[in-house]
């Protein structure tokens, strides 16, 4: 059994061992091992040249990572919390995302940006945001998110292997989730969606921290005689929608679940594409369960903001009642 | 970095000393008032830390060890001056008259600040490192336009000095000669990153490259901080542009209650800095010079205990907000889709009420 945080740590270790051009950079990732201990022990084993504690400046981290990548390195940048990526937003969206295209393909920028994201840990503001849509909206970036230790282990290595920039979203409230994992070979490539549980009545489409919530909702629904299929998207850009379309064609009902605000969130794109592709199979509109369109609330009421089993099942009922 | 000039007026041993540039005339009453501030601020911090340990707060960022830097600069401010804090300036908030209970709301997790920044001239705490230094500069630019003689002080940490925003604030303040004092508490650590990980030159020396003076002050010496900050504010009021003050101090506690400093720093450093405690030296000085006796010290302690008890009661009794409060202040003007969403949310919540 290994936690999701430890699995990322093990994956980072593999990549550091495999390729001497891989280096980690970020705030407090060395001795401290990161505020979530994801990089724990790596500086001790690989040295301060490979695991670099940077000055406190996110634009600096991303901007210099771009330079390092131009020089042939494969930087893996840690952003301490979701809400602190914005100082690096220009470097990511205007520089990192576009440079390969501007050079007409003559340079690659194999940079990974690790971002712990999402709420549910009782934190103060800027520590609980789900800002994946900002990045998924930007062409040139690949966006992935793991939901379990095994994916965490493999996806981080695959992200580092990618010759494109990858924003790697880590579901921080699932860092301590444990599972046995297969360390022999990956079962999927980086950008494949996965049907986690099959079902016949309705499809729950989700990713990251909401996957576990959806699996819980599925169990509860089962006791009420409803059979839900659960799909973990894993990759938000590019999207792998074939499994989703196949599922919706089977069930005719779909509910999308994510923590991010629904307005122009991933669910908006998903429902548009599903509607276009599966229009004649749909028995109800695609519904979304997500964060409300407000700033992430204070910790004492965050449970009301985060999609939970009740809200998911409420949407499931609404879909069936349609 | 050995032989840097450091303004000091009261040594760690409680000795009054002279500085070639800065001096301070201080009455017994004023000194006792400063002592009272220091004790109150520390007691407040201790109580908040305890409340966090007991689960009443989600997080706490201790100001332990930085009381003199905060009280000294806070008391240098005059009515109408404006302070832009990080998340650790509890001592400045105290001087500005912000109700301590208010400060704890965001750490308890019932709001993201909630006080009116204009009421006391104390902006909301800013967690995103360095952002407030630009706000401070802009506010100062506003004061200039209004031909006001008020001043602004921007607080930030040694780690923050690496941020783009902070450096841009220096540029703007310098170019526009904005009436803002940049007050950096160099507590030697940014979470686990020591100061050497942010800079190769003493921070105060950076100022000259931006075109304004920088000065390093003993951040554990409330008199020196008061004198240096007063002077910087006076200059600002005279329209002579910004000053950078580096208050040289030490973060005696963890970064926050979530942090474990034993992973990255030596306990022996802490011992060295304990000898430079900002409160003890004032107490020793007051006692040794006969300006205060044990009755006074006991009275201050009693006042601090009373404040702590009141604080505790108010925090424990602080209710959670209504969940639909999250929709309440997103926009200043009506926003129809959000109003609808709020309505739906309320109906959804109500749907649970009648269930058995
Ligand atoms: C933009 C941004 N990046 C990262 C963080 C996470 N973080 C919070 S406090 C801190 C260290 C701040 O150090 P310093 O500026 O020296 O102030 P101190 O906390 O020591 O008072 C970091 C990295 C943040 N809050 N904002």
Image (tube, grey):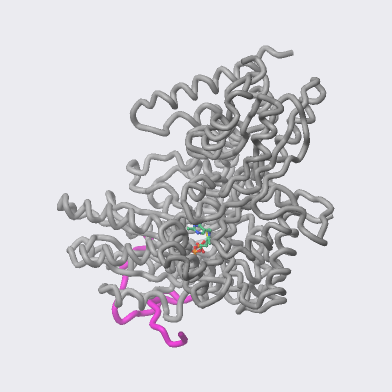
Against A276, residue B31 (above or below) is: below
Judge by depth and name the residue closer to the eye, B154 or B40.
B154
Instruction: Check residue B25 for magenta coloring.
Output: yes
Q: Nearer the viewer, residue B134 or B258?
A: B134
* Residue B210, quarter of picture: bottom left
Q: Quadrant of the N terminus of chain A?
A: bottom right
| Quadrant in which residue A259 is drawn | top right
Give the image location of residue A316, x and y in percent. Answer: 67, 23
Residue A139: horizontal and vertical position, in percent? Answer: 47, 52
Q: Is residue B197 above or below residue A154?
A: below
- Rendered-image quadrant of the C terminus of chain A: top right
Vertical relation: A156 (above or below) A319: below
Q: Which residues are magenta?
A: B1-30
In the picture, measured across the screen, residue B25 lies left or right of residue B235, that is right
Residue closest to the eye, B68 or A80: A80
Is B181 positioned to the left or the right of A155 in the image? left
Q: Main secondary structure of the magenta part?
A: loop
Q: Residue at 31% x, 52% y: name it.
A: B82
Residue drawn where x is 59% and y is 41% of the image: B312
Residue sitting at x 33%, y 64%: B168
Whole-percent x and y of residue B270? 61, 72
Whether residue B56 is visible here, answered yes or no, is: no
């Amino acid at each position: 059994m290994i936690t999701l945080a430890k699995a990322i740590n093990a994956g980072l270790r593999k990549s550091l061992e495999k390729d001497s051009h891989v280096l980690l950079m970020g705030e407090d990732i060395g001795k401290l091992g990161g505020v979530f201990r994801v990089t724990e022990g790596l500086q001790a084993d690989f040295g301060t040249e490979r695991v670099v504690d940077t000055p406190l400046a996110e634009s600096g981290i991303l901007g210099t990572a771009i330079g390092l990548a131009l020089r042939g390195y494969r930087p893996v940048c840690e952003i301490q919390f979701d809400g602190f990526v914005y100082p690096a937003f220009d470097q990511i969206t205007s520089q990192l995302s576009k440079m390969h295209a501007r050079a007409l393909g003559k340079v690659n920028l194999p940079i990974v940006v690790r971002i712990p994201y999402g709420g549910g840990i009782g934190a103060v503001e800027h520590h609980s945001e789900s800002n994946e849509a900002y990045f998924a909206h930007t062409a040139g970036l690949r966006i992935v998110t793991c939901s379990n230790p095994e994916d965490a282990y493999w996806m981080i290595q695959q992200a580092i292997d990618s010759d494109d920039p990858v924003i790697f979203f880590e579901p921080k409230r699932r860092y301590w989730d444990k599972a046995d994992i297969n360390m022999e070979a990956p079962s999927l490539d980086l950008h494949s969606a996965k049907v986690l549980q099959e079902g016949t009545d309705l499809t729950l489409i989700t990713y990251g921290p909401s996957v576990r919530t959806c699996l819980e909702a599925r169990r509860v629904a089962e006791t009420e005689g409803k059979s839900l299929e659960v799909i973990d998207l894993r990759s938000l850009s590019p999207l792998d929608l074939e499994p989703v379309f196949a599922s919706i064609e089977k069930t005719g009902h779909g509910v999308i679940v994510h923590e991010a605000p629904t307005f122009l969130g991933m669910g908006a794109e998903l429902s548009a594409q599903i509607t276009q592709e599966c229009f004649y199979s749909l028995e109800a509109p695609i519904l979304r369960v997500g964060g409300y369109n407000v700033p992430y609330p204070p910790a004492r009421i965050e449970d009301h903001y985060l999609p939970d089993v009740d809200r998911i099942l409420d949407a499931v009922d609404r879909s069936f009642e349609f | 970095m050995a032989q840097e000039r450091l303004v000091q007026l009261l040594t760690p041993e409680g000795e009054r000393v002279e500085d070639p540039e800065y001096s301070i005339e201080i009455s017994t009453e004023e000194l006792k008032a400063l002592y009272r501030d220091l004790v109150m601020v520390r007691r407040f911090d201790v109580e908040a830390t305890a409340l966090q340990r007991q689960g009443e707060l989600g997080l706490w960022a201790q100001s332990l060890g930085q009381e003199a830097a905060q009280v000294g600069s806070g008391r240098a401010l005059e009515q109408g001056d404006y302070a832009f804090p990080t998340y650790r300036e509890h001592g400045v908030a105290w001087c500005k008259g912000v109700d301590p209970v208010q400060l704890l709301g965001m750490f308890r997790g019932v709001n993201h600040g909630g006080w009116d920044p204009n009421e006391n001239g104390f902006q909301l705490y800013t967690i995103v490192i360095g952002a407030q230094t630009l706000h401070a500069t802009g506010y100062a630019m506003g004061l200039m336009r209004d031909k006001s003689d008020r001043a602004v002080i921007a607080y930030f940490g040694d780690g923050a000095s690496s941020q783009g925003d902070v450096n841009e604030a220096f540029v703007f303040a310098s170019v526009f000669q904005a009436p803002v004092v940049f007050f950096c508490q160099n507590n030697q650590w940014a979470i686990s990153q020591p100061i050497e990980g942010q800079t190769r030159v003493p921070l105060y020396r950076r100022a000259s490259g931006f075109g304004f003076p920088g000065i390093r002050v003993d951040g554990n010496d409330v008199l020196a901080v008061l004198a240096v900050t007063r002077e910087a504010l006076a200059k600002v009021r005279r329209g002579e542009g910004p000053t950078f003050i580096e208050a040289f101090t030490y973060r005696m506690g963890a970064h926050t209650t979530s942090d474990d400093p034993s992973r990255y720093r030596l306990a022996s450093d802490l011992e060295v800095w304990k000898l430079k405690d900002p409160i003890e030296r004032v107490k020793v000085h007051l006692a040794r010079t006969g300006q205060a006796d044990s009755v006074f010290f006991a009275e201050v302690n009693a006042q601090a205990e009373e404040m702590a008890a009141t604080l505790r009661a108010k925090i424990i009794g602080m209710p959670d907000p209504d969940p639909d409060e999250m929709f309440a202040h997103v926009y200043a003007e009506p926003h129809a889709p959000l109003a609808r969403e709020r309505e739906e949310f309320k109906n959804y919540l109500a749907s649970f009420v009648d269930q058995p």
